[in-house]
Image: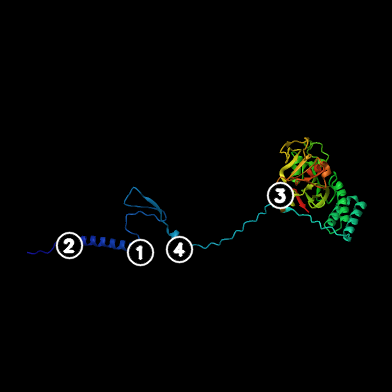
């Protein structure tokens, strides 16, 4: 026989239904939260903007990776615009270092061919120069420059000889004496500093130390003392050899200084024309010499020694002289051959003259141009 459920059964059934409804409500709420915020129900542990450990099958290896936080993602999507200011580096002015050779720096003196008639302008400049010196001796530099200007003009042989003689006479005063004149770009006074050597001072000025010793009346270079005032010459000196007249003219930079008579190569062994430089290490005093005929090695003072007291070796740079070696400027034991074709190609000078030229030309910097 069927029975109605008792009240206790009804109460238990009501409690069970409320429990089911409660659990269902929790699942519904959790689903809504997952849908809204996108949090997965997984086993990976994440922290916003930190490091995450990625679990792989081999759990012994756990690789840390950077997980961008929300702020980082926003920066990637909408990066802030930054205004970059172009930075222009400051320009630094470095001192100019001259790397040019003596050949590149050379300003050759061009002497026009002699004319038959005298040049009135040359005569005028000669007169002006002499008037300056006679009226005011201190204006010797101005007179020198006037004469040197005239030397580059067309003129006859007589005028050229006059200018050479006058310039040579003036050189005894402004160059080969202890005097230093105002406005002279070639000579100046110098106060010796502690540690200075005559050789280093001369090297800086591209002249041999011997010429500074001579003009300053220094008996021995080692006697140079700090605080002493000496005259320095701003070189280099150069030389020009004329085969047609057997002359060697010396210039301080581009200003004529002195002329010497020379002996040159005989027929078949002519002195090559072109540009030469004084060879590095090529200036020697009384060096041993090998006779080209006998092959015998001779020393200064031996019978047949032909070089005199000085040897200035030359390196061929341009023209017929290019690449030629074994040539040089030297003295002679045969002074009567000066002014003739007498040598095997070298340039001969009287022994007294070769000493003067030796003291003027400096290795590497001094150039020797041989022309017809």
Left or right side of 206 for 79? left
**Secondary structure at numbered mark 4:** helix
Give the residue pinned by disc 3.
Answer: 316
The foreground one among 307 and 260 is 307
- Which of the two labelled residues, at mark 4 and mark 3, occupies the earlier sequence position? 4
- Disc 2 and disc 4 in contact, CB within 8 angstroms: no
Separation of disc 3 and disc 1 at Cα? Answer: 95 Å
Q: Residues within 10 Å of mark 3 (few under 14, many from 20)?
A: many
Give the residue pinned by disc 1.
Answer: 36
Separation of disc 2 and disc 1 at Cα? Answer: 39 Å
- Which of the two labelled residues, at mark 2 and mark 1, occupies the earlier sequence position? 2
In the figure, residue 72 lies in which quadrant? bottom left
Look at the image and tell me whether residue 193 can be seen. no
Separation of disc 4 and disc 1 at Cα? Answer: 22 Å
Image spot of residue 191 (x, y percent): 79, 42
Query: Which residue is depicted at the point 21% across and 60% down?
Result: 16
Image spot of residue 302 (x, y percent): 77, 35
Q: Which mark is residue 190?
A: none
- Disc 3 and disc 2 in contact, CB within 8 angstroms: no
Front: mark 3 or 2: 3
Specify the quadrant that holds the C terminus. Answer: bottom right
Image spot of residue 148 (x, y percent): 84, 54
Left or right side of 127 for 34? left
- Which of the two labelled residues, at mark 3 and mark 1, occupies the earlier sequence position? 1
Look at the image and tell me whether residue 131 can be seen. yes
């Amino acid at each position: 026989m069927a029975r109605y459920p008792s009240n206790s059964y009804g109460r238990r059934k009501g409690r069970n239904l409320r429990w089911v409804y409660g659990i269902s409500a929790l699942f519904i709420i959790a689903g809504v939260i997952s849908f809204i915020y996108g949090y997965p129900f997984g086993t990976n542990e994440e922290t916003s903007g930190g490091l995450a450990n990625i679990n792989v099958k081999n759990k012994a290896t756990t690789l840390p990776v950077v997980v961008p936080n929300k702020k980082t993602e926003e920066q990637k999507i909408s990066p802030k615009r930054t205004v970059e200011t172009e930075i222009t580096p400051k320009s630094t002015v470095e001192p100019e270092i001259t790397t040019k050779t003596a050949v590149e720096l050379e300003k050759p003196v061009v002497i026009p061919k002699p004319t038959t008639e005298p040049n009135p302008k040359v005569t005028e400049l000669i007169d002006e120069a002499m008037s300056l010196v006679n009226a005011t001796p201190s204006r010797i530099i101005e007179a020198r420059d006037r004469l040197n200007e005239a030397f580059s003009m067309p003129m006859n042989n007589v005028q050229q000889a006059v200018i050479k003689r006058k310039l040579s006479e003036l050189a005894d005063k402004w160059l080969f004496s202890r005097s230093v004149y105002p406005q002279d770009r070639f000579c100046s006074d110098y106060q010796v500093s502690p540690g200075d050597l005559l050789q280093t001072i001369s090297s800086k000025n591209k002249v041999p130390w011997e010429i500074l010793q001579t003009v300053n009346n220094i008996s021995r270079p080692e006697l140079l003392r700090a605080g002493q005032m000496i005259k320095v010459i701003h070189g280099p000196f150069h030389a020009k050899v004329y085969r047609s007249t057997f002359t060697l003219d010396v210039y301080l930079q581009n200003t004529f200084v002195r002329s010497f008579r020379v002996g040159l190569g005989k027929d078949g062994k002519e002195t090559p024309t072109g540009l030469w430089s004084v060879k590095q290490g090529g200036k020697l005093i009384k060096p041993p010499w090998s006779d080209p005929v006998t092959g015998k090695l001779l020393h200064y003072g031996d019978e047949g020694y032909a070089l005199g007291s000085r040897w200035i070796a030359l390196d061929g740079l341009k023209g017929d002289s290019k690449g030629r070696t074994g040539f040089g400027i030297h003295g002679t034991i045969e002074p009567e051959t000066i002014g003739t074709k007498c040598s095997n190609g070298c340039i001969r000078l009287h022994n007294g003259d070769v000493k003067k030229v030796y003291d003027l030309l400096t290795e590497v910097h001094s150039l020797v141009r041989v022309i017809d």
